[in-house]
Amino acid sequence: MKLINKTVCIALCAAMVLLSLCSCTMLSSSAREKEPVLTVGEYSVPYELYYYITMNLRKDLPDATEEEIEAEAFEMLREIYGVFALAEEYDISFDDEDVEKVVDEAAQLAIEECGGKKEYKEALGKSYMNDSVFRLLKKHSHVADVVHTSIINSGKYPLDAEKIKALAMSDEFIRVKQILIMTEDSINSAEDTYFTTGEEHTDEEALAIANEAYEKAMAGEDFDSLVDEYGEALHMFNNTDGYYITRGMWEEENENAAFALEIGEISPVVKSSSGYSIFLRCEKSEAYIEANTDSLADDYYTAQYNLLLLEKIEGLEIKKLEAYESMLKEESEK
């Protein structure tokens, strides 16, 4: 729910899992693997990275067309290189010694866990990855953390607990409850910590269920009871507090619908990549804010990071290089 684009995590999650399993010192890529096939803004995308992303997308989204795979891959690449572009604004170089040291230390530890370079290479290959891609994605995750911390400490945002409480009570935050009905697509791409893994619905079935829940809500049935009856967001189960959200935490469709509500108002059915949602805006609780100041502060800082990153992502143009079509054709003929 707090990711700008949930599809980004589909291709990146395998890398993060492998991080706990294996890495090693640099194993050279071939000239073919290193050849640029795209540019994202001023950054060149090597074939090995694009191959890794698209192969994992084909595995995770077996019913997607090649055009859909390409579109998803481009979104992921914008997110990866958007982090590097944002880092430059905060004078953080993704190639400096500190960053390289973090990658090298992780690599050294992981090769010991893998049992050697050969085993490491084989483990990466099972996820369509090589050493260079692993290192780039590790660098990406570390730089994202450094940028996030730099944004918090930039002086632009409140750090004092009392100021955070005042911010949470202001129009920057709203409190909403959600009835979420998931589709097959949203279930397949969901993070288990946020959503149920129950019965799958087609898009048409999910919409029909959402409309039924909406009609009951508009007829005056208790919203919390409808959440328990229909909802598929784990956070909302047995939770009368709902969500306290600020801009940058959710998908734009859901945020726009929630922020458009007056207190006590129920939204129409809203479609997003998470599924179909109905929102109820509620009065905020000072007691809740007092008890959850730290988590609200974390949410706010992450939201600000997301908004800044999204601005960078939207400004990155992707261009196909001459090698792009030839290498894709080569892969399709295998």
Image: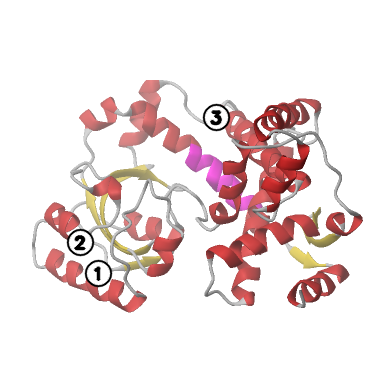
Amino acid at circle 2: Tyr
Instruction: Tell me the distance, in whole angstroms, between the alpha carbons under discs 1 and 2.
Output: 8 Å
Q: Quadrant of the C terminus?
A: bottom right
Query: Where residue 152 is drawn, which disc sits there?
Result: 3
User: What type is the residue that disc 3 sits on?
Assistant: Ile
Magenta segment's dominant SS is helix
Assess disc 1: are there few (<14), some (14-19) or many (≥20) residues with their C-alpha within 10 Å of its C-alpha: many
The residue shown at (54%, 45%) is: 306
- Up/down of 97 relative to 278, above or below: above
Which quarter of the picture shows residue 273? Answer: bottom left
Q: Are marks 1 and 2 in contact (CB under 8 Å)?
A: yes
Locate residue 97, reporting x and y percent: 80, 26
Queried whether the magenta region covers residue 91, the answer comes back as no
Q: How many labels were placed on the picture?
A: 3
Q: Is residue 182 above or below residue 247?
A: below
Q: Which is in the foreground here, disc 2 or disc 3?
A: 2
Which label is found at residue 210? Answer: 1
The answer to whether residue 315 of the structure is visible from this angle is no
